[in-house]
Image (spheres, rainbow, N blue to C red):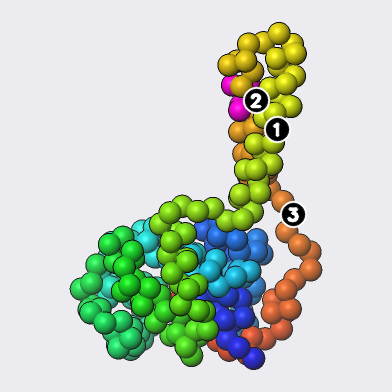
Amino acid sequence: MEPASIRYKNPGAMWGSALAIKWGAAKKAVTLNDGKGQGNNIAVFPTYVQGICAQLDLWRTSPNYKNKRFADAIAIWSGHNEVASYIAFCKKRVPGLTENTIMNDAFWRGATGIAFLKAQAWHEAGKEYPALDADWIEAQKRVFSGVPTPNTVKKAAASAVTIVPAVGAATQAGISLPMALAIGVGIAVVTFLAWKFWPSKAPDTPHPDAVAPDAVAVATQEQPK
């Protein structure tokens, strides 16, 4: 069986979180019975690109890692377990990476940032990660361009559709066109926000790995990622 980070298209072996869901992860993470007794879980993504987006977004926005030295950030990521070997593993695969490399947006926008994400995914999986080069490049573009997930696009489109009937009804009621447009936009915004943030019921059926032992332990994690 493939490692969990590959099975669930989660190259960083990230825990379930709001950030993971933002990039399309299932709302219910999978519990890992990895023998560590730490209650580890892993977010489940539908595609490698979305998993990479979450991996990159976490590194560049979390206070635990944002703008920190590589050595300090990876120590936090690993839960201070086997830090020296993790550093050596990444340095071997990322040209120019040193303990003092600052992991800021300039780093993440370049080829070195992608090389690091690949190295980390390799380390977490225990084998070279199978995502295509195009997947890593596409994820980098999405994160830095703010491209929403397909789910968000559909919600926005559906909200926009509500503008037309709202404007029509308002103009028939004798309201001026500018005011009618303002009303229509307001209704669309409220509809979109309600759709986006209204809580939905999590599925009752657990994922198979939530009840069955995981065959491969994800890399040592003592702190949620």
* Amino acid type of the residue that numbered disc 3 sits on in the rendered structure: Lys
- Residue 186 spot, x, y in % from top left: 61, 27
Q: Is residue 164 above or below residue 208?
A: above
Q: Hey, which quadrant is residue 216 in on the image?
A: bottom right
In what element is the residue under mark 1?
loop
- Residue 15 spot, x, y in % from top left: 54, 69
Q: Residue at x 72, y 74 (%)?
A: 207
**What residue sits right under mark 2 in the picture?**
184
> What's the magenta bit mostly, secondary-structure-wise?
helix
| Residue 154 drawn in magenta | no
Give whichever of discs 1 and 2 has the lower sequence position.
Answer: 1
**What residue sits right under mark 1 in the picture?**
162
* Amino acid type of the residue that numbered disc 1 sits on in the rendered structure: Thr
- Residue 213 in view (yes/no): yes
| Residue 183 drawn in magenta | yes
Cα distance between the residues tagged 3 and 1? 25 Å
Q: Residue at x 69, y 36 (%)?
A: 161
Q: Is residue 189 above or below residue 2?
A: above
- Residue 33 spot, x, y in % from top left: 63, 82
Start-end of magenta stretch: 182-186
Q: Is residue 145 above or below residue 9?
A: above
Q: Are marks 1 and 2 in contact (CB under 8 Å)?
A: yes
